[in-house]
Amino acid sequence: MKVLFKILLLLHINFIIGQSVSGEKLYLKGHVYLINSGSSVIEGITVNSSDTNADITDGLGEFILEFNKLNPGDTTSVFIGDSIKTNVALDKYNDEYELVNPNTYKIVVLSKSTIEVPLKLTVARKGYIEREAQKVYLTLKKHVDKKLEIERQKILKLEAENIVSQDSILKLNHQLQNFKTINDSIALHNTSLKIASFNRDGAEESVKKALTQLRANRDIEAALKELNPHLSNSQIKQNLKSNEQAFEALELRSRLLLSDLKVNQAIDQYKLMIETLSADESAYTYKLIDYISMLGILLNRNLKHAEAEEYLKYGLSLFDKHNLSKTQESRLSILLDLGKSLCEQSKKQETIKTYNEGIRTIQSKSKPDEFDDFNMVRFEIGLAEVSLNQDATSVKMMKKIRKTISSYDDELNDMFGEDIHKITNKMLLAMQLAVKDNRKKAESLLLEILYDLKIIIELEKKNPTKYNPLGVSLEPLASSILVSLARLKIEEKKTFEAIDLYEESIPYFQTQINKANRPKDYMDLSEVYGQLAYINYSLLERNLALEFLTKAENYAFKCSEILNYLKSEQINVGYRSVRLNLIDKNISDFKTNNTDLIESLNQLEQLETSINSSDDPVFKLNAQQNKVQIRITLDENYKTERFKNLLASEYGGLSWHALEAKEFELAETSAKKGLAINSTEQWIYTNLALAYLFQGKIKDAKQIYKSLKNEIYDGETTYKDIFLQDLEDLKHLGIKKKHLSEVYKILSN
């Protein structure tokens, strides 16, 4: 299961391969050393290559591989034992050893140089690296957890004291989320594995001391303290030129900076290392590629996609410039990250071209391995997402993704747990259905997934080891499903259902931000706020209701708050600011051009509040009459269907308040006016029946009671229930007992 995670590890290649003086054959000589043993050699280890016969190390730990068919500049892979997948071999005593940093030797360039520089293979007793990595992991985890708690307490204190602006609190919270991202168990595991794989033998003293500090389970800051005096920015260039060991120290320091929650410092260091090495590309090509790949990952994570694109394209150019194999795993990794940076900048055609290039590269390989299978899935998912409007392409991609994933059921089950893997498969099927324009089935499946996911989220709280073994964040999946459902509702023109779904997604975004994620989560949440602001403004234009104006302003403000923060972090928010500015302008223009309307709507709200807070029937009647007059003016000025229906409803309200104030004739005329405007407002008949009854017009009242008593009023409630309740509420106002008895008889039958 570690295969997928190893794709992201950037390991370093630093060796030169010799050629025999005759020039007829290429040879690869080297030694096998035991890690951290004072350069002790191992005898009896089988050293193998993908392009020649194996050799076994002698008493000096030496091996020689002979290549008959390869030319200078060609590449080969070196491994120990019988399989490049396991990289495990026995020594002459039948003890098991594993190759340390096996990816370092997956691509070896055969050199034309006549100077033979032996290749150094480092091995460890099987299980040693894993045990050492666990020690480092505990150190890093303890350190990061401590710093997270300090930052959390700072924010809680500031919020409690209320001494800083909301914007400052947001910024502090964002810093905390960046810290939490690094505390992800997978990221820390990979860093620990890399640090555990450093070989003390031959390393400079600062590296040895730093490794000792970590492996003794001391604070990470002590390890950085050992490295920093030797690796200040002013000394890095000189160190790189004068001392090959500086590479190892820099690699260690960059990983410690990330684990010390200093992402920006790590980014700056990678930039400086790239700038230094780019002055001598031919000598440091592979290290440049590794550093560029890591920098691209970090920049994308910080949403600096344009900068990531620039560096990653430079990394790709190195393969052409120096005639390197285009099928190398490092190049595929760069293509994946470049595709992501292009996609985030809405450069659709370039994104498709990049992902297709990755797919063609893998297909061109004569011997694809498990890395290629997983990379193919990632390329195809990226291509499917960016090509969703190209039905044939998307359906084809989704079928291939499902086929590939189905062949890795065991690995995915181990990685994410069986339940989460099933959800992943359902998500892919839902995407395929949506692409095929089968919206109803896609919606049904998404609802099913959401239901399952909510259950898993609850179960995870009780037993995370069983239901979410690697601590995969489930909230992004839940929010993604809700947003997908909301978009389907928008296409179906079910606006209010879409609003409910968007609003339901907000707590999941906020939970994910509070738990541990990247600036991208802020960006996604701003998208939801922006969409809600836009939808409510559209409803405001159509319905001219204050509730939509208030909501549009509120969501626009929340969106603006996040985007301003992201911009303060030099993160490109792209079209989002333009769209938000347009919404803000539309809202401002609406308020400027409709001051009379807004004043009238505010008056209606105030009158409604006063009616609800009063017990005086006469006061309530007068207030309702004022509401009717305002509605009459609005209906005359705007002539909208909605305002006409609202006027009918206000007349219905006036008839009720007239009944309470014993103005029965007014109650009758008001009810009739309301029904004349909108006959579908049948509830007004309940007031009209009472108006007839109080005036002794028993025949007219009985006709209403008979015709409506069995009709559904609301849900399971019938008009009979409403009639009986109204009679109970108002009979004290003076209905004749005879008439009341007749009505009860009609309703009881």
Image (cartoon, rainbow, N blue to C red):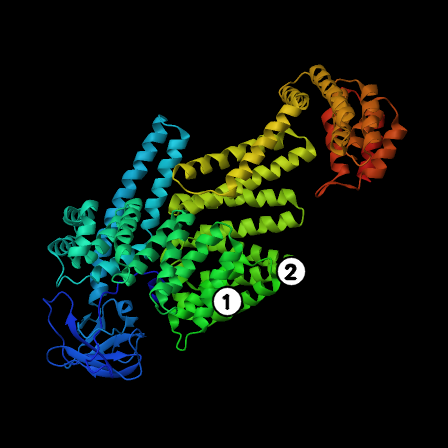
| Label 2 residue SS | loop
Question: Residue lying farthest front?
Answer: 22
Residue 56 seen by the camera: yes
Is 655 located above or below residue 53 in the figure?
above
Question: Which residue is tagged 2?
Answer: 438
Is 594 located above or below residue 230 in the figure?
above
Classify mark 2: residues with Cα within 10 Å, few (<14), some (14-19) or many (20+): few
* Kind of residue at disc 2: Asn
Residue 705 % position (x, y): 83, 35
Classify mark 1: residues with Cα within 10 Å, few (<14), some (14-19) or many (20+): many
* Nearer the camera: disc 1 or disc 2: 1
**Residue 487 numbered tag:** none
From the viewer's perspective, is 594 left or right of 415?
right
Dot placed on the residue nearer the N-terminal end, 1 or 2? 1
**Residue 401 numbered tag:** 1
Q: Nearer the viewer, residue 387 or 22?
A: 22
Query: For the N terminus, which image quadrant?
Result: bottom left
Residue 533 % position (x, y): 57, 37
* Kind of residue at disc 1: Ile
Do labels 1 and 2 touch, CB within 8 Å? Answer: no
Query: For the C terminus, which image quadrant?
Result: top right
- Picture residue at 52% right of the left edge, 39% below the top: 529
In three-dimensional space, the C-alpha distance between marks 1 and 2, rounded to whole angstroms, equals 19 Å
Q: In terms of image quadrants, where is residue 399?
A: bottom right
Q: How many marks?
A: 2
From the viewer's perspective, is 574 left or right of 651?
left
Q: Nearer the viewer, residue 244 or 696?
A: 244
| Label 1 residue SS | helix
Question: Residue lying farthest right?
Answer: 699
Residue 160 % position (x, y): 35, 29
- Picture residue at 12% right of the left edge, 62% below the top: 202
